[in-house]
Image (spheres, rainbow, N blue to C red):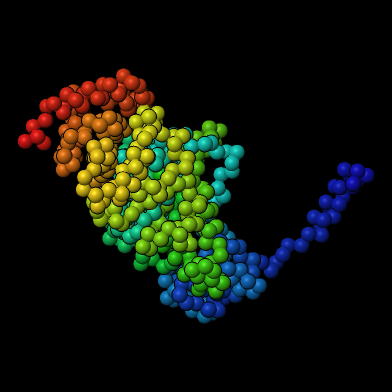
Amino acid sequence: MNSLKPEEIVSVLKEEINNFEVKTSVKETGTVIQVGDGIATVYGLEDAMYGEIIMFDNDIKGMVQKIERKTVGCILFGSDVGIKEGSQAYRLKRRAGVNVGEGIIGRVVDALGMPIDGKGNFETDEFLNIEQEAPDIISREPVNKPLQTGILAIDSMFPIGRGQRELIIGDRQTGKTSIAIDTILNQKGQDVICIYVGIGQKASTVANLVTTLTKYGAMDYTVVVSSPASDPAPLQYVAPYSGTAIGEYFMKKGKDVLIVYDDLSKHAVAYRTISLLLKRPPGREAYPGDVFYLHSRLLERSCHLNKENGGGSMTALPIIETLAGDVSAYIPTNVISITDGQIFLESSLFFSGVRPAVNVGLSVSRVGGAAQTKVMKKVSGSLRIDLAQYREMEVFTQFSSDLDPSTKELLKYGKTLIEILKQPTCRPMKLYEQIIVLCVAENKLMMDIPESKLKDFEKGLLTYFENTYPEICDNIMETGLYSDELKEKILSGAKEYKEQVKGLWQA
Ligand code: ATP
Ligand code: MG
């Protein structure tokens, strides 16, 4: 090699260039040989890439998902009516993507990023491929800023940080979507762009959700990507990738983004449908072998970028629906292992009135602890253990009538905690509200209040603090720090209020 002189390389290159033949046989158009069930097999597009967009006769777009020697298999983003054997199909030489711009905020778009809220087009300044490579490790930073959900049970025990991926998992109708929506509502004024991706939901559910978000002013910083159950499987399949591309647009500008995938079980089903129609071999539970990769490459795109890369973040809240609480099924175990923790919602808790129905034993947040505010960390320290102890004792003492005083106290304390962790929808709690309530409960100042009066007491207590000690509330919000002095102030304030309203439950 060393003997080759520069002049010689130049001559070799020249010769190569002179002899270069332009390949004239690049095929731009092909012919449909088979179509049905939203899948078209096209002959003669040998040069098409995987994931490339193909245009069909009736202006329907398709995406290459299977490449064979002479043919390619395309999934169709629309009706196959009008496409028949012999129809023409041609390459667009680009991959599927969405047009994004600041104007997309506040809008409802379909799986390909086109507006469907009847408010016309929005200005766009970038075309982003829906499939992007996840940021590499070097450009990331550990999760260190909290993303408050406003839900006491979650913020206190399973804190979420910006850039984290926290799974919400549970049976149908256990309040999964509600947790995600409350989290979006709580981002008001927090400088977080929210994206809700509805996959295979009823169109009416999404419409209601948009109404709720609008009512609480959350559409000012939210984008809704909707691919309802009536959409063909290919659209449901691409919707979360489009949503993520929209999120990346903002993340790369240094913004914090929250993205909700509601839900990935339906996404996996849509992918299974496509794969079976493309005649890929079925694997476990008839899902194709790469269904794990499907979700991992999606969720890996959520992260916290370091300063050099703008410092933006994307927090993901994927939702998974289980069947009869079975978390060990294929898709749930996949997504549990991909994410950084899960909020497990249980039907039995939900029906017994514990809402949000968070199962404290099975839920976990693996990285959010580092991002929790100091004051919350201090105040909520023993909450999980206290609740676990209560649950154990509750079962144990179910049938015994005479209990010793210490057991009685433990049971009452546990019941108080369960009661204060109940929270209605659309009522996210601010940090100071969470801290005051937890601090008062943990120091057993609520032990003598009957269960039925606890919620009223809590409400009154918070109003009392807001009116009488606004400086305590401000201090918590501004510093997020804990001190013994703060604790004393909260406890003495609570005692004052208790004295005032004593008559309420002693009558
Ligand atoms: P699906 O499986 O149908 O998607 P889901 O698990 O997403 O259901 P939601 O739609 O969030 O559940 O909630 C189901 C019902 O429970 C709704 O009517 C909602 O208002 C109610 N609900 C959810 N959370 C609470 C709560 N914390 N307090 C009171 N009601 C709640
Ligand atoms: Mg739901």
Q: Is residue 465 left or right of residue 369?
A: left
View extreme (left): residue? 507
In the image, is residue 68 above or below residue 390?
Answer: below
| Nearest to the observer: residue 147 or residue 335 | 335
Report x, y in % for residue 389. Answer: 34, 42
Q: Residue furthest bottom?
A: 85
Does residue 463 lie above or below 261 as drawn?
Answer: above
User: Where residue 422 appears, x then y in whole percent?
Assistant: 25, 44
What residue sits 21% from the left and 45% below the top?
402
Identity of the residue drawn at 31% across and 43% down: 390
Instruction: Please report the residue visible at 70 percent of the width from the left and 66 percent of the height from the top.
Output: 24
Residue 445 seen in the figure = yes
Horizontal and vertical percent position of residue 290: 55, 62
Q: Is residue 438 above or below residue 132?
A: above
Residue 11, percent from left and from top: 87, 50
Vertical placement of residue 152 versus 345, above or below = above
355 sits left or right of 21 in the view: left
